[in-house]
Amino acid sequence: MWQDNTNSYAAGSSQTPYYSQAGASQPGVPLQFYAPSPVGSTFYPGSRSSLEGNVGAQGNIAQQGVAPAYGGNIQQVGPWWTAFGTGGLEGEPPLLEELGINFTHIRAKSLTVLNPIQRVDERIMDDADLAGPLLFIICFGTFLLFSGKPQFGYIYGVGLLGSGSIYTLLNLMSEKGIDAYRVASVLGYCLLPMVGVGALSVMVTLDGTLGYLLSTLSVLWCTWSASTIFVAVLRMSDQRLLVAYPIGLLYGCFALLSVFNVGSGVAK
């Protein structure tokens, strides 16, 4: 019994080996996993099958049904200014909006300040930004510079100190509370009437009756607009005068900077 099993195993093992069978049936033919180069082709200057997607005798990769690794639409190259936008990407907001600069919101808030008699929406500062206030502050300082009053340092100092003071007072007076970012945004947007007075100072001297009248009017306008927004956002209608008083003092400092030249005595 043991002898029969040995003979059958020996007979089967002599017939099953792959290399001996392939060599015996097809002498002189290379192994099956090796594909010789086509007749007449050279290795270096001709075709390089390993770089063209051919895998031995199995054909190219595309014939095996392998899906490509990358897909989608290829965007055409546009002008150089397309690098500063997101117009070629679906669902992406504009680049300036991603940076916090939304001209639609700036225009809406500016119109709210310029029309103080209209009703203010309590959710107007849900999307607060500093792009508009920074623009107004730079314009205000530039107009004063053209009128012979370089007051950039005083403008930034008064604005920073005033914003911190108003932020502290509003959080002490209201139950809802407000963050410093929104306080600076409201105060900056409501500076727009004062920017107009600064533009007039380039053509007209404000150190006189006309200048005093325009400065007083701009202070009242800025104070009314800012207090209206703060009262609407914080729901402090019963404390309107208490909110308007410190805001009026702040804009009064800006009015003094636009009327008088603070550094004139030092320069002499």
Image (spheres, helix red, strand yellow):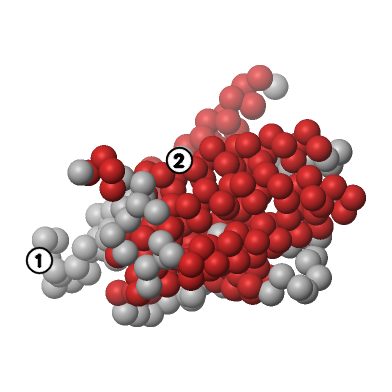
Say which of marks 1 and 2 sits in front: 2
Q: Nearer the viewer, residue 157 or 97?
A: 157
Where is residue 82 shown, x and y percent of the image? Answer: 38, 74
Left or right: 95, with 147 as reference point: right
Crowding at dot 1, Cα within 10 Å, few <14 / some 14-19 / many 20+, comes out as few
Residue at horizontal 41 percent and vertical 62 percent from the top: 207
Q: Which residue sits at x=11%, y=61%?
A: 44
- Mark drawn on residue 108: none
Snapshot quadrant of residue 102: bottom right
Q: Left or right of 78: which side holds 107?
A: right
Q: Which residue is mark 1?
A: 45
Contact between labelled residues 2 and 1, with CB atoms less than 8 Å apart? no
Q: Residue furthest left?
A: 45
Q: Is residue 258 above or below residue 75?
A: above
| Image quadrant where one finds the C terminus | top left
Q: Does residue 158 lie above or below 137 as drawn?
A: above
Front position in the image: 81 or 69: 81
Question: Looking at numbered disc 1 in the image, what kind of residue is underneath it?
Answer: Pro
Does any portion of residue 230 appear in the rendered image? yes
**Circle 2: residue type:** Gly
Task: Tell me if mark 2 has few (under 14), some (14-19) or many (20+) residues whose alpha carbon lies within 10 angstroms of its own.
Answer: few
* Residue at 37% in and 65% down: 143
Residue 100 appearing in the image: no
- Which residue is labeled 2 in the image? 157
Measuring from the top left, give residue 87's x and y in whole percent. Answer: 49, 75
Query: Circle 1 — which element?
Result: loop
